[in-house]
Structures are given as structure tokens and as C-alpha cells.
Amino acid sequence: MPRVGVIGAGLMGTAVAQRLIAAGFEVLAYDIDGDKRVSIARTGASPIAEVGTIITACEVIVVCVFNTEQVEDVIAGPGGGVDAITQGGTVARLFIVTSTCDPERLARLAERVEPSGVQLLEAPISGTSRQVAQGDGVGLVGGDREVMGRASAVLDAICPRRYYLGAVGTGSRAKLAVNLILGLNRAALAEGLVFATRLGLDPVAFLGVARGSAAYSQVMDVKGELMARREYFEPQSRVDQSLKDFKLMLEQARATEQALPFATVYVRMLEDCVAMGEAEWDNAAIAEAIARSRRV
């Protein structure tokens, strides 16, 4: 079987591993957290204790880490992809980055490491980890078209539905804009459910009404039950991940002198969740921050 590495064994890394294994790939998986390596082994992936082993053994590596800094460390940091190629005689490696990153930094990273034999393709995925595992994630691909062609079998396994946006950085920009709309849809649903509950309506029953109304959006299917039943403890996408993405959006907005008033409020709500110890809950917990708000 063709072999693919997965670096990052969290929610998205586990979903990616499941997709690759179902498509017939052998998967080697690394995470700095030993418990996550044990957990991802249940998918059929082979847990690896050293990131350098993944890079040496696999010509294609899917990077599913938390943020831009970690992506830079995996690819250009000590013991990362560049070191493995230049010091260990390893042939060129292709890194597919699924993490939501700072577009400019990712583009600079791709340019910086290319002379060392590292090819970088970005493919941030729109969708929760559960949607990705089910094959319903949407890939937003940026990079060289020829490199994308080389990665087509892996991309087909991870995200059968995808869009090519252009050079490295364009995929991340599209992902941030998509996540802005998605996050605000979540907030609108949460506020509506909290409001309905305050008015004395049963939130679960009201969710059914909202689904059948002109207010319907897909977020009701993905997050509605979690909000209505206050079930946040088996996350599909976490509060701290959403906060990281929205802070990136605000940074990009400042650079373009564009105000994002709704996103600014949303960040404050997410920060409230983090302050209340809810950082690792499903991001449907935005409903809790709204419920804690009181008119003064």
C-alpha cells in the first residue's frame, strides 16, 4: 500500500487518518502527545514516536497541527522536513497543510523551503472533524497545479470535494473568509436558541421549528442539537481552535483596513468561553457565553 504520514493526531488528524486508511493507504502518525498517538492507533494508523521518522519514511506528509507556528516548526524547524532532506539524504518531500494558517507566513514558508526540496501544498478543510471523516469536508487548495496533481490520490481520499484557489496563501484566505461566515452563523443560531429558551420555549422543539423555517442553515444540522441539549464535551471542532481562527481574521482585517464588527464581538464571546474553562469544548459552547450575558 502507498504510505502517507500524518503529523498531528488531534480531531482533524484522526479524521484524515481514517479517510486515508479507508482509501487503502498505510498511515504513519505522529503527535507530541503520547495519549493522542495511542488514540489514533485505533483508526489503524501506526503511531510513531519521532517526527523525523515520519518525514524519512513518507514522501507525502499531511500536516494537521494547531497553528502557523507549529506548521513552520514541522517543516522548517530543527528535525523538520528541511533538516531531514538536507542532512539525511532524504528525497524531496511533499507537505499537505490542512491547518488554518496565516496566509502570508505560509506563502513565505513555501518559498523559503522550496530550494531545499520541500514542496508545500495547502489544503485547509471546511467542515468539522466528523464531516471530514464522513467525506463531507471541502478542501480549499493553494499551491502549484502540478504539485496538486501529484497529490491527487491523497486529496481524493481526504476531501473528494475541493476547490483550487491559486498560489499558496489563497487557500488560507478563503478558509478564513468561510470560517467567518460559518462562525457568525453559529453565533446567530446560539443567540436564537438562547432567546427562545428565555421566552419559555423548549430549545430542542424550537430547533425543529427553526429548521423548517426561512432561517434554516446547515449549521442547525451540525451544531443545533449540541446547543439545544448543551452537549459540548465530545468536540467536533473546539472553542480554542475557533478563537485562533477568528484572531487570524482580525489580523488580516487590520492589514486591509477593514472593520469586522460582528467578528470582534464573536471573539469576545469565545474569550469568555476560554476564561470559563471551556477552551476544549465543542465550539457550539458559544451558546453558553451568550446565555451568561445579561442586559445591565
Image (cartoon, rainbow, N blue to C red):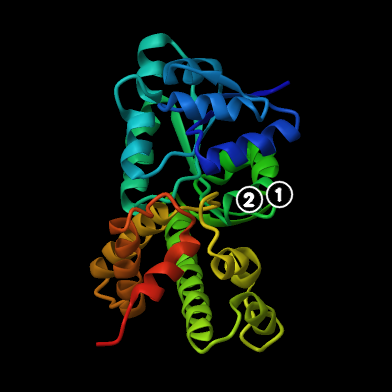
Placement of 241 over or under 114, stated as above or below: below
Q: Is residue 19 above or below residue 176?
A: above
- Local crowd size for mark 1, using a 10 Å CA cut-off: few (<14), some (14–19), many (≥20): some
Q: Which circle marks residue 134 in the picture? A: 1
* Image quarter (top left, top right, bottom left or bottom right) of the C terminus: bottom left
SS state under label 1? loop
Extreme residue toward the front, this view: 200
The kind of residue on which mark 1 rests is Gln
Q: Is residue 91 left or right of residue 42?
A: left
Relative to residue 295, is residue 121 drawn left or right? right
Would you say residue 156 is visible in this rendering? Answer: yes
| Residue located 40% across and 10% down the image | 88
Q: Are marks 2 and 1 in contact (CB under 8 Å)?
A: yes
Q: Residue at x 40, y 75 (%)?
A: 291
Residue 146: image x %, image y %? 58, 41
The residue tagged 2 is: 130
Q: CA distance from mark 2 to mark 1?
A: 6 Å
Q: Position of residue 212 (x, y in %)?
A: 71, 84
Measured along the vertical axis of the image, is residue 278 above or below residue 52?
below
Q: Which image quarter is the N terminus in?
A: top right
Q: Is residue 240 above or below residue 252?
A: above
Q: Position of residue 40 (x, y in %)?
A: 58, 29
In this rendering, position of residue 84 left or right of residue 224: left
Q: Is residue 4 visible?
A: no
The answer to whether residue 144 is left or right of residue 103 is: right
